[in-house]
Structures are given as structure tokens and as C-alpha cells.
Amino acid sequence: MPTGLLPAVRKKNDAVKDLGDVVGAASVAAATAAAREGGDEPVEETKPKRGEKVVKLRPEQTGEGYKSVYSELTRPSLGSRIRAGVRVSGELMITFGLIVLLFAGYEVFGNSAKVQDEQDSLANQLDDEWNDPTVTPSTGPTKAAPAAPGKDLVGRLYIPKLGMHWVVVNGVRPQDIRYAPGHYPDSASPGKVGNFSVAGHRIRKIFWRLDELHEGDVIGVETRSNWYVYKVIYSEVVKPTQVEVVAPVPGQPGKKPTKALLTLTTCNPKFNNYQRLIVHAELADTVKRDPALPDAGKPADFKKA
């Protein structure tokens, strides 16, 4: 049986630590056996030196099955088990992160067609309501949000600088603003003294570019009876808990309003929601809406939207 030499170990059952010595010993044994089989002169086997131990390289059958010098070297250790667990956990976390990223990408980019379809449907519904003489326009804010989008529509919101316009629903619950900006039910009506406040998602088809608005930019609102021209006065970024931004006088809850204001709110930054981007505007002009005129007398400031 071929044998090899390994450095002596302190304990009888300790694993062999130097695989290089094992391979070297195996080479010597193999060379010895080859010389014998080829008929060459016998090669004297290397005798173990003092402090060395002869280790059998071929597996031997024991009560626990076949074992060899390599058994101890390849047996899983606590460290290898921990490394394997960390590797699997890392792969799972990467997979989960990719799924979340894909979902977020769909929410921001992938549902644009659905938003547009819903907006087209709401626009048709709004036109039907305004063209029906039996339906009277809303005279004030509604305290409770509607059961679903498309009921108690407020009007249209225009941002000419961005080339965008939307039908605004009454309500800011997730189901209300999924496909449209929503009017805070407790805030003022368009054109009235107070703070007409509107919330919208930070997605491509709604308030994605709201950060591009600056002082003096026009924001328009169309109702059944009037066109309202607002101009941006300032923007700010706040925490989600700072609800005073939609108070009748922004930032001053309880104070009596004297101006007709408009406030737009959305998530900030893009792809996240730990802040809120707020745009405040003040009423600059009111124009009577006349269905007999082209575009119902839409002001020139709205033409781009």
C-alpha cells in the first residue's frame, strides 16, 4: 500500500494541516511504485524521519464507511457553513432588491398609458357634466372624499410650462389620486379666498417635473364657470408631517386668509417619499368661461398645456 510522510501532529485525531506535504508524499510513493512495476532497480522507500508520521493515502473502510486523509480536509466546518449561509442570504437580498426596483420602475414609468386612459375617461365625464344643464357647479369644498375617482370632479389643472393638464378629482386617498391629481376636500375651492390645495403622485404622467416651476410661472385652473390664472410665488421642501402647508394661510394654521392661493403637493425626491415638494401660487386673474367661444375662451397663458 502506498504511503506518504507528513509532519507529526500533536493529537492523534487532529486534521492534517499541510496538504502540500501530503501531495509531496504521494508523489514519492507513486514514483516508487512505478519504478517497481517497470522493472527498474528497486528504489529504497523513504523512511520517516524523527517527528514524522506515516499516513496512508488510500481510503480505508471503517465503522463509519470509507475514510482517507482527505476526509478531514473536505469535511464542512462551522466557518464554511456560515460562509454558505451568508452567500445564500446575499443572493436572496439581491433578488429581492431587483424585484423592488422593477416594481418602482413600473410605478414611475410603466403605468403612463393607464394614467392617460383614465385621464381621457375623466375628461369625457367632466365634459358631459358641464354640458348637462341639469348639473349645477360645485359651490364650495366637499368635506368627505368621494367613494371612487370620477365622482364630484373639481375641474382641470394646467401647467403650461410643462405642457401638461389633468382632470382633478375631489379627494386625496390612494384610490382617489392613483390616476389623477386630487383636491384636498377641506381646502378652498378654485378661485376662492383661502388655499385651493391639490396633491399628485411623482410619476411621469402627473407631477414628475413639478420641481421645474419657479416664481412667476403660470398654473391654471378651469371650472365650469371660470378660468383662474395663478402665478407661482415660492416652493419649499418639507417633512410629510408638516400638513400646515395646506392650511388656509400656508404655514400659519388658524390664521384667517385674505388671499386666494393654490398649493400643489407631491413626493420628494423622485423615486422616494420621505419628503414633500410644495409649490405655492397666488391668484392673478379670473376669466369667464364661455362655451360659445373657441376653447371656451381659454386664456392665452394656458395655450401650451
Image: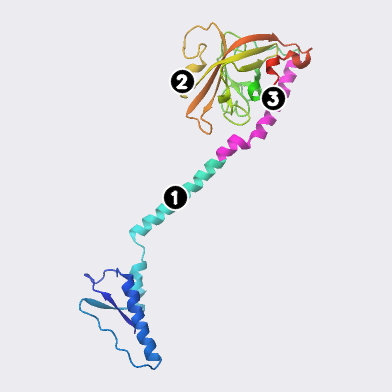
Disc 3 residue type (three-letter): Leu
For the magenta stretch, what is the residue range? 103-132
Residue under pointer 2: 242
Residue 30 x/y as whole percent: 37, 83
Of residue 182 and residue 213, the one placed in the foreground of this image is 213
Q: From mark 1 to mark 3, how far is it between C-alphas?
A: 46 Å
Instruction: Find numbered disc 2 in the image and state the secondary structure of the residue it sits on.
Output: loop
The residue drawn where x is 34% and y is 68% is 73
Dominant SS in magenta: helix
Residue under pointer 3: 122
Of badges 3 and 2, the one in the foreground is 2
Q: Relative to 246, does residue 97 appear above or below in the rendering?
A: below
Q: Is residue 80 visible?
A: yes
Instruction: Find numbered disc 1 in the image and state the secondary structure of the residue it sits on.
Output: helix
- 107 within the magenta span: yes
The residue drawn where x is 71% and y is 27% is 121
The residue drawn where x is 53% and y is 27% is 267
Residue under pointer 1: 90
- 201 within the magenta span: no
The residue drawn where x is 32% and y is 81% is 3
Q: From mark 3 to mark 2, how far is it between C-alphas?
A: 31 Å
